[in-house]
Amino acid sequence: MKLKHSFVAVLITAVAFIACKKNNKGGETTGTIEITNGGNLTGTYKKDQHVIVRKGTITLTGYTYFEEGATLTIEPGTIIKSSTSNKGALIMERGSKIMAEGTAQSPIVFTSGRPVGERQPGDWGGIILLGKATVNANNPTIEGGVGRQYGGNIDNDNSGSLKYIRIEFAGIAAELNSEINGLTLGGVGSGTTLEHIMVAYGNDDAFEFFGGTVNAKYLIAYATADDDFDFDNGYKGKIQFAVSLRDPEFVDGGDAGNGIECDNNSTGSDATPRTRPNLSNFTILGPNGAPNTAANHNFANRFRRNTAFILNNSILLGHPDGGLSLESNGTYNAFIDGTSQFKNNILYALAAPFKLGSDVTVNGASATAIETKATADGTVKLTSAAGAGLTNAFSLTNPNFLPAAGSIALTGAAFTGDQNDAFFEKVAFKGAFGTTNWTTGWASWTPKTNVY
C-alpha cells in the first residue's frame, strides 16, 4: 500500500513537470517551462515562471512580456526568429530577469523570420529591458507602445545578463514617434551585465538608454536608421569599447541619424539626475562622403536639451553635417565649465567639425570656443578620415577597425577624474580597438544573406 502511494506521487509529479515543460505561452502555470527547437515564445509570463529556451530555432510571436518575478534563460547558439504575421517583441518588465549568455563561438541571435532576400528593418520589435534604477521622470512609460513603466530608486538593480547577442532587423513603429529600438533600456541598474551586443539594420535607434545606471562594454551599432547610441531621462552609466558603422544608403527618412544623440529629457528641463553618460573608447563612423549617401545622415555627436556628457579617448569620422554639436544653453555651459568632457578624441567631419546650435544664446558662445576648448583638452581635428590610420574601417561587409601600424590612434588615451574608475580598462589606444578585434567570431556584417 505504501509503495503504491509512492508510485502515484511520483507519477503525479512527473505529469506536472511535463505539462509545465510544454507550456510555451505563459499563463498561470508556475515552475520551469522549457522551450525546445521549433517551439514558440509568446504571451505573458508571470511571477515564479522560469522559462528556459534550449539551443535551437525558436519563434517569437507578438509582444511577449515577462512580469516581475519571471525569468528567461536562453542557451548559447539559439536563433530566435520573429513571427512574420504577428511581429514579436521581447519585454522584460521591472523585477524580471533575463540570462542570455552566448559565446564568441555560439552567439544568441534575434532576427527576422523572413528568408534571405526579404529581410527588412522593422521586421519585428526588438528587446526592451526595464529596471528599477533612478530616472529623472515620475514613473514613466517606455516608448514603443508596450504600456509598461520603468525606473525606481535601486541603482544597483539587476535585470540579468546579455552577452554575445545579435539583434537584427528590429524596429517596429508602434505609433508616431514611438518605435521600439534594437535594444531599449529603461531605468536599468548597474547590477545588469551588457557585453558583446550587436544591433544591425535597426529601424530606429540601435541602443537607447532611458535613465538608469547600467554599464556596458563591446557594443556594435551597424547600419542604424536613426541614432546609433541615444541617452536621455537621466542616464548616468559607463560604457567602454563601442563602434558604429553606418550604411550610406540607409537612414531614417523622417529623422536625422546621429552617432550619439543625448538629451537630459524631451523638454530640456533641469530634472535630476541629469543625463551624463560616461563614455570612453568609441569609434563612430559616418558615411564619409560615399556615393549615394542618403540625406538624413547627420552628426557624429548631438548633445542637446540641457544634457551633460563625458566622451573621451574616441574616434569620430566621416559624418556629413557635423562632428561635435552642442545645442541649448545648458548643454553649452556644461561643456565650457567642465561638467561635460570631450578629451583626447580624434575627429573628422565633412562639414562643421565643431558646431554651435542655433538655440544657444550664451554671451560669447561660438563654434570657435567649442573647438578651442576641445583641442586644449587633447582632441585632434583631422582634414580627412584617412588621417586616423584605421585599416579598413568603412567596409560594409568586411570592416577592419583596427589602427594600422603608425596610426595616431594607437597611443594617447588617458583616464583621469570620472574615468579613473575600476570599470574602465586603462588602455593606451583611442577608439574601440587596439591590436585585438573583439568582433571576431560572433559579429556578422552580412545579416541580409545569412542562412538561419
Image (spheres, rainbow, N blue to C red):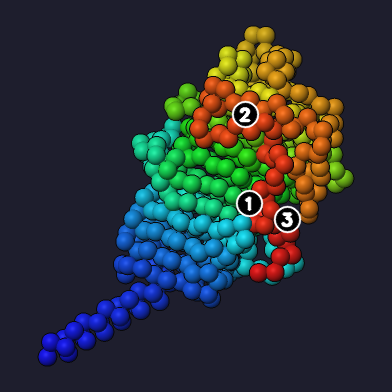
Marks 3 & 2, CB-CB < 8 Å contact: no
Q: Quadrant of the C terminus?
A: bottom right
Q: Residue at x 75, y 28 (%)?
A: 347
What residue does disc 3 label? Answer: 445
The local crowd at label 1, few if under 14, some if 14 to 19, many if 20 or more residues have their Cα within 10 Å, is many
Tell me residue 374's x, y (percent): 69, 19
47 versus 149 height, above or below: below
* Dot 2 or dot 1, earlier in sequence: 1
User: Please, what is the three-letter code of the amino acid marked with disc 3?
Assistant: Trp
Type of the residue with mark 2: Leu
Total labels: the figure holds 3
Is residue 201 toward the left or the right of residue 124 in the image? right
Q: Residue at x 42, y 49 (%)?
A: 159
Q: Earlier in the sequence, mark 1 or mark 3?
A: 1
Task: Report the Cα–Cα distance between label 3 and label 2.
Answer: 26 Å
Residue labelled with disc 1: 199
Query: In the rendered image, which quarter is residue 283 located in?
Result: top right
The answer to whether the residue labelled 2 contacts the one labelled 1, judged by CB atoms less than 8 Å apart, is no
The reply to whether the C-beta atoms of the residues labelled 1 and 3 are less than 8 Å apart is no
Q: Which residue is mark 2?
A: 311
Say which quarter of the image contains residue 13. Answer: bottom left
Q: 123 or 397: nearer the eye? A: 397
Q: Residue at x 60, y 62 (%)?
A: 106
